[in-house]
Amino acid sequence: MLKVKFLGAAGQVTGSCYYLQTDGLNFLVDCGLYQEREFLSRNWNPFPVSPEKIDYLLLTHAHLDHSGLIPKLVREGFKGKILCTAPTAELLPIVLYDTAKLQEEDAEIKKKRHEKEGRRGPYPEVPLYTMADVDRVLPLIEAVDYDLPVSLGSELSLTFHDAGHILGSSIIEIIGRTGGETRKILFSGDLGQWNKPLVRDPETFAEADYVFLEATYGDRDHDHPEKVGERLAENVNCVYQRQGNLVIPTFAIERAQELMYHLNLLVQNKKIPVLPVFLDSPMAVSVTNVFSHYLKYLDEESRQLFASGQNPFAFPGLKLIQSFEDSKKIQQVKGSSIIMAGSGMCTGGRIKQHLVNNIGRPESTILFVGYQARGTLGRQILEGQSPVRIYGQMYEVRATIDQIQGFSAHADRKQLLYWLSSFQRPPRKLFLVHGETEAISHLATEVQKSLKWSVTVPQYLEEIILD
C-alpha cells in the first residue's frame, strides 16, 4: 500500500513537505520552511509525523520553502539519508548555514527590541535552528545523478529528472508496487520556464499514475521572455535619471545569477549606463561560485559563454559584498546604484536595511522579480500597503514599486499546461499543490476543461491512499 500525507504546500505556496508510507518504508519529499505570515507557527510546531521513523528525505531542490526545515527535522530525531542531485548537495549547506545565521541574528535583535519595548513577540525569541543544527545535517546528504534509478528497497525506486527551475532542481519519479501492480508517481517540485538562460528546460513525461504538480502561477502568464531585458533597462535608466537607487529583493539561487546575466548583456550592449551594482548577499556570492562547478547542468548558451572565457556573472561596476560593514557603506554611495539583496520576499536579511534607506525616496524604485507569498513584507509592498513595518518601525512607501514577472523561475499557467500536455494518457489523479487557493482553482478548472483529467486539491494534513 502507498499512502501520502500532505504536511505542507497544500492550499498555500511554501512549506513543501509530503510524507509517503509503503509497507515497511517511510519517506519525505521535501521539508520546507513556511514563509507566509499566517502559517509561520507551523515552523515552530513539532513535526506532524515522528522524524525518527522516516527512512529517507528526497529533496527536489535547495530553495528554503523546500529545504528550510531540515535542520529542525534532524534535531527532532531524523537519522535517515537525504537524497538529492549533486548541485543541490553543494547548495544546501550554503542555504542552511546562511538561514541559521540569520535566525540567530534575528532572534537576538528581536529579544533586545522586545526587552526595550517591554513586550513579547508571537514566537520564541530563540532561533528556529542554529549553525550547530546544520552541522548535524551534512553527514546525511547523499548526491545522486540525474536519470540514475536508485533503489530504496525491494519494492521502491526513485529517479531525479531536471526540473529546469534552479541549478540542480529535480522532478522526482518514484516507482513502487502496491497490490501486486506497479505505480509511477511524479513530484514536479518547482517547474522552471522554457528557453531561459542558465539552466536547461524542464523534462517532460509520457505517463505516470499520480502527478503532484506545483501551481504557484496557475492563474497567470509571465511577461514575454524577450521583454525582460527591456523592462530591466527601463527601470535602471529611470532611477539613473532621477538620481535614485534600484533596489531588487533577490533570491540567492538562480534569480541573482540571472539578474547578473541580463545586466551584463545590457552593459555590454550599452543599453544602460555603467553604475555601481551591488550583490549584497554572501549566500548569493557563494552560490554564484557553485555554478562554475556544474557547467554540464547549464543550458547550451551559458556553457558556450563559459567555454569562450566570458563569465556571464562579471561586468563593469559589479561589486560582490560579503561583510556587514561593506553592506552598510552602500548607503554612502553618491548617485545612482543597483542593489540586489536577500531575502527575495523581504522576510529577513540585508534587503530590509536597503528598504529602510530607499522606500521613502520618490527617486528610488523597488523592483520585484520573484514570487511574493501572501503575508510577507514583499507582498505588502507590492500590493500598495503604506506604511509598512520594517524592524519594528513604520515607513511610508514613496518609492516607485514595479514587478517583472518574466524573471520568475516558475513555469506560468501556459507552461504548466504545456508540461501536462506531454502525457500520452491521463494519470489516475493529478494533485495540485504549492499554490494559493485562487491559482490552484484556476489551474484545476483549466485542466478539467482542456484535458478532462481528474484533479484533486489536497488540504493540509489530508491523507490519501494511492491504490
Image: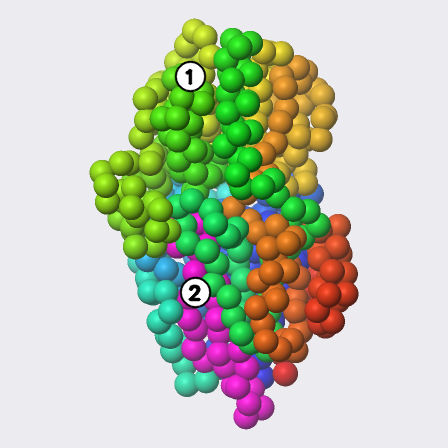
Residue type, label 2: His
Dividing the picture into quadrants, the one containing residue 211 is: bottom right
Per the rendering, the mark at residue 184 is none
**Residues in magenta, as a range:** 156-184
| 419 relative to 33, above or below | below
Can I make out residue 421 in this image? yes
Residue placed furthest toward the top:
334
> Mark 2 or mark 1, which is nearer to you?
1
Q: Is residue 40 left or right of residue 132?
A: right
Give the secondary structure at mark 2.
Answer: strand
Q: Position of residue 172 (x, y in %)?
A: 48, 66
Quadrant occupied by the C terminus:
bottom right
Q: Give the labeled residue for mark 2.
A: 161
Q: Residue at x 53, y 74 (%)?
A: 206
Residue 298 x/y as whole percent? 35, 51
Q: Residue at x 34, y 39 (%)?
A: 288
Mark pair 2, 1: CA separation: 40 Å
The correct choice, above or below, for 396 with respect to 428 in the image is above
Judge from the rendering whether residue 435 lies leftward or rightward of residue 208; answer left or right: right
Give the residue type at disc 1: Pro
Which residue does the image show at 46% across and 39% down from the upper left? 255
Residue beneath label 1, please? Answer: 273
Q: Nearer the viewer, residue 194 or 403?
A: 194
Q: Position of residue 138 (x, y in %)?
A: 33, 54
